[in-house]
Image (cartoon, rainbow, N blue to C red):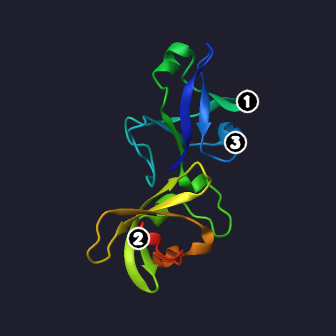
Amino acid sequence: MLLLGHLARVQGLKGEFLFHALMDEPERLPKLQGLVLAPPSVDLEGEDAAVPPAREIQVRLFRWHQDRPCVALDGVPDRTAAEALKGWALWMPEAQATRGEGESFRHEWIGCAVHVGGLKVGEVVRLDPTPMGYDMVIMRDLRKGRAGLREIPYIKAWWGVDLSQRRLDLDGPEGLLEL
């Protein structure tokens, strides 16, 4: 499953939500099938289907409200029903996503080996989005005498990515891993 966004707050009396979108084109939501609504504590990334208490849902209405996406969901008729779902996450089956050349999903990076100068120095724990518009690669440091996690910006020029081989080659600035 891919995370599309969160139901930010209830808008009005008809069960609508302001939607905090993590997707490029939220106006596509009413056309998507197999959407899943899950509490914020449930992480469906990489899953193939809803895991209770998550449940399938359909977006019945999409509109813009003061330059923010606003959605209404089937089975959520009014503000009272909507209040219980505030903060919940909206997910989409990965099979419905389209990817351009060279694009990947964050979960595909998890467990990939990170190499510097041909030597394995770590493995990817996760990718975190940042407000600056790039992802932060969170790497478990496997170098001798080292422990813990390192945060490394995904700057395309620094990384060689071969997901089929589960290998990432990092060629960043001197001292990057010493921070």
Q: Nearer the viewer, residue 76 or 80?
A: 80
Q: Amino acid at mark 3?
A: Arg
Q: Amino acid at mark 2?
A: Glu
Please tell me the numbered disc located at residue 28. 3
Mark 1 surroundings within 10 Å by alpha-carbon count, few (fewer than 14), some (14 through 19), many (20 or more): few
Instruction: Kindly identify the residue that appears in the image at 38 percent across and 35 percent down.
Output: 53
Which of discs 2 and 3 lies nearer the camera? The answer is: 2
Q: Which residue is mark 1?
A: 64
Name which quarter of the figure residue 79 lies in: top right
CB of mark 1 within 8 Å of CB of mark 3? Answer: no
Give me the C-alpha separation between circle 2 and circle 3.
43 Å
Q: Amino acid at mark 1?
A: Trp
Give me the C-alpha separation between circle 1 and circle 3.
12 Å
Mark 3 surroundings within 10 Å by alpha-carbon count, few (fewer than 14), some (14 through 19), many (20 or more): few
Q: In the image, residue 58 lies at what x, y percent?
A: 59, 34
Q: In the image, residue 20 lies at what x, y percent?
A: 59, 36
Q: Is residue 31 above or below residue 162?
A: above
Badge 2 or badge 3: first in the primary sequence: 3
Instruction: Kindly identify the residue that appears in the image at 44 percent across and 86 percent down.
Output: 118
Q: Which residue is mark 2?
A: 178
Q: Nearer the viewer, residue 3 or 66?
A: 66
Which of discs 1 and 2 lies nearer the camera? The answer is: 2
Badge 1 or badge 3: first in the primary sequence: 3
For the image, the number of numbered tags is: 3
Is residue 37 left or right of 65 when viewed as pictured? left
Q: Secondary structure at mark 1?
A: strand
Q: Is residue 36 above or below residue 137?
A: above
